[in-house]
Amino acid sequence: MNKNRMEQLRDFINTMLDSDNYDSKILLEKSQELDKLIVQTAKESIYADNVLGHDFTNEFNSTLQNIQLFKKMYDSMRIIDPVKKEVLEIKENQLLRKEYECYTTLGRKAICENCISMRAYNEDDTIIKMEYNENKIYNVTAVPIFIKDKKLIVEFIKDTTNSLYLQSEKICKETKFISAIEHMNSMVIKDDLTNLYNRKFIDERLPTELMQASLKNEPLSIIIADLDFFKSINDKYGHIVGDQILKEFAKELKKFIRKEIDWVARYGGEEFLICLPNTDIKAAKLIAEKIRNNIMSKEFVIDNKEINLTSSFGVHTVCDGKECLTVDGIIKIADQKLYKAKEEGRNRVK
């Protein structure tokens, strides 16, 4: 688009200069417009080099041409950096950085719970899902592409509302279908037992939280929570009671976090991970202490049995003036602190 417009402006300006009689004011306006487009194009070129590396830009252009072959099959296409949540839009074989995050395209105000591009990125595979937004149903296909060592995701978006024949006379049928879409998307990232987020969600969401904390220079705290002597509970009362205990413990964890900012996920077994964006180590430990005291003082009643529990916590904070670790790195340190809490007698925060 910019290239075509620049060529038009150059032709127009040259024609005016060749003429004996022209409007100086119009010539100035067109010249200024051309200058702005030249600067904008230069910035976009620099950005592409920064994202992909100068040596890879030609290879990217070749990949871009191949992607364009699918353009007529979808309503829109875009390139995503799923970790940074940046949109790199394709327009006439140009890579343009958009001034908004990828999740805002479908009217969202926060990062998608079930991020299709992050899953395609992690699994290195094509992922397809359906999204419902503002009375429309979209088919979204995420495909990983590789430019040397740089992995990006191409998203193909298609409005399938009419082609799915949802214009039923009975609204209840449409509502059930929409509910099914939302339920299927939720099932992928939710733990069946506790209804908290699952390990897949941790793998997809935590890298983004870490990147956001690094870019904003804000602290990110992770708490690993564990029920003490949970194996003994299973042995004494049975696994059905044990499952109920895990459900109740999960509910207690959610009471102490900020909605739409923090999140809790079941890491595995009786271990849970709490993610606290923009929270320093002091505040994170205070939250862990509140949870610990609440669990210790609460009587859990399961099948008319009163069961007293304690819990242990490992807390670690990154990006608070320290180097931001990898996802595996921050979880490893928080887990080591949890292990230390258990070594020192359990029912404590480290």
Image (cartoon, rainbow, N blue to C red):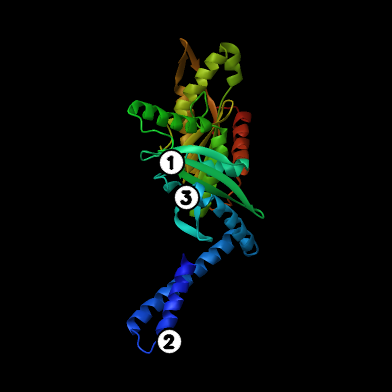
217 to the left or right of 259:
right
> Mark 1 falls on what kind of element?
loop
Q: Which residue is drawn at 61% across and 50% down?
A: 145
Q: Distance between the residues labelled 3 and 2?
A: 42 Å
Residue, disc 1: 261
Report the quarter where the C terminus lies.
Answer: top right
Q: Residue 18 carries which label?
A: 2
Q: In this view, does 82 lie above or below 251?
A: below
Q: In this view, does 35 lie above or below 47?
A: below
Q: Distance between the residues labelled 2 and 1?
A: 62 Å
Q: Residue 96 carries which label?
A: none
Q: x%, y% of residue 126? A: 59, 41
Q: Residues within 10 Å of mark 1 (few under 14, many from 20)?
A: few
Q: x%, y% of residue 128? A: 53, 39
Q: How many numbered discs sit on the rendered protein?
A: 3
Q: Earlier in the sequence, mark 3 or mark 2?
A: 2
Q: Nearer the viewer, residue 88 or 22?
A: 22
Q: Which residue is drawn at 33% across and 26% down?
A: 170
> Mark 3 falls on what kind of element?
strand
Q: Nearer the viewer, residue 13 or 217?
A: 13
Three-letter code, disc 2: Asp
> Mark 2 falls on what kind of element?
helix
Three-letter code, disc 1: Ile
Residue, disc 3: 76
Q: Earlier in the sequence, mark 2 or mark 1?
A: 2
Q: Which residue lies furthest to the bottom in this view?
A: 20
